[in-house]
Amino acid sequence: MLSKFVTQIRNTIQKHQMLSPRDRVLAGVSGGADSLCLALALKELGIEAAIAHVNHGLRGAESDADEAFTQGLAETLGVKFFSKKVALSGPNVEAAGREARKTFFNEVCRTNGFSKIALAHTRNDRVETFLLNLLRGSGSEGLVSMAPVTENTIRPLIESGREEVEAYLKEQHQPWRTDSTNFDLNFARNRLRHVAIPKLASDFNPNLIETLARTVEILEGEDTWMRALTNEWLSRNGTKEQGDFVVRVAGLESAPVGLVRRVLRTALRMAGSGLRDVSFDHIESIRALLEPGKSGKVVEIPGGLVVAREFGRLVFREPAAGLVDYEYELKIPGEIHIPELGKVFRAEIVEAEANDSLGFRVFVDAESIGPYVRIRNWKPGDYYRPVGLPAGKLKKLFQRARIPRGHRMRWPVIVAGSAIVWVASFPVSREFAPRGRSRKKVAFEALWS
């Protein structure tokens, strides 16, 4: 028969659908009370599990003793044991440690066929994280971090308190290791755990942990609902385009502010951002791009993304590498591949009667150009006289055609001497257009390579 405490853990696992019958679990065990409790509970529940341990080496012999203790536990339980020693560096060793554990646990899962990673975060841990994120400034996404299930990671103890964990271990006569750094008040979490939370509980609410845990659960349900609304909106108004993520402005500028901010954060994530160091001010700067008259404006985002307003769209993309001018010679007849565009341009001589009603090709008077033309990128100041359109700066033509600024610098222009013959996607220039007396034409077309 299961103990009352382990029955509670089983109910948490079932409530949040953490496991299926075929799952094999890798439990992260440090040697501390919470992770030992996790390992014993999984064993009592009959769940197929193994133990993984990362030795951070920060406490010398003490860290090595933690590893030996954890290995001994695995042997006692008759489960596989995986360990790795890492050297942490950088200004934030806590974050480095979390990343090292995540990387190692995923590697063990991948190479040994485990489908789930079980972590020993408790109700207390979740409340501490809630308060830390609240004090740093966070939206509901951050306030409900440390969810019961996150992708392949499960937290079976997330509804159990630290006092319950220690009581269970004492009932099992199971000792545990205590990390001496857990009492170092130089760490924000330790100050919160040992000083701030006890003080708040004493002065305001003796059931503070339970009360705030319920608050996080309420926020989690609302966050899930808002995430679903955001994803539904983006499924209708967001698209992937050649590596960019594009969001239509129409409808977003008048949407509730909460939805707008959610959409922008999610769009950044879909464009490849991990949202690290992306602040409230960054999101507000992007939101300002929704205002009228912002086309052509760009916001830079930490981590290497930019967000550009291009007419009726917001484009989330990696910044373009330094744009290099290109220029190629296209013989007539002949063809040339333009690697900067991923296109092949072809020129062929055709009879005067030739035509292409589908518009796949454009025609010029063969006698008005020489044996070749040059294909180059657009340059500021280019002047163009297209058939059927007003003559003027090519920039103005791009604007009228609503071609995004980010596309213009690479836009192909065909020239003969110093005169523009044809700009891709537009009519040919007036002085090169076929006339009634033209006996031969040159057909130009652009093809995907």
Image (tube, rainbow, N blue to C red):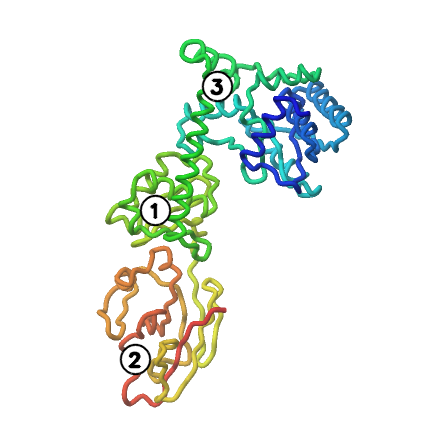
In this view, the mark in front (3 or 2): 3
191, above or below 13, in the image: above
Q: For mark 1, give the secondary structure.
A: strand
Instruction: Find disc 1 in the rendering and name its residue.
Output: 298
Q: Amino acid at mark 1?
A: Val
Residue sitting at x 57%, y 19%: 162
Q: Where is residue 68 drawn, in percent x and y?
A: 74, 23
Instruction: Find disc 3 in the rendering and name its residue.
Output: 209
Residue sitting at x 33%, y 71%: 418
Q: Earlier in the sequence, mark 1 or mark 3?
A: 3
Whether residue 96 is visible, yes or no, is no
Distance (Cα) linking label 3 and label 2: 79 Å
On residue 433, which mark appears?
A: 2
Horizontal side of residue 306 vs 6, given as left or right: left
On residue 254, which mark appears?
A: none
Q: For mark 2, give the secondary structure.
A: loop
Q: Along the line of sight, which residue is nearer the eye, 217 or 358?
A: 217
Q: Quadrant of residue 395?
A: bottom left
Residue sitting at x 43%, y 63%: 326
Q: Where is residue 394 drawn, in percent x and y?
A: 29, 64
* View extreme (front): residue: 1
Answer few, some or many: residues within 10 Å of disc 3's Cα (few below 14, many 20 plus, some between 14 and 19). Answer: many
Whether residue 310 is visible, yes or no, is yes
Horizontal side of residue 133 vs 86, given as left or right: left
Residue sitting at x 45%, y 12%: 206
Horizontal side of residue 169 vs 379, given as left or right: right
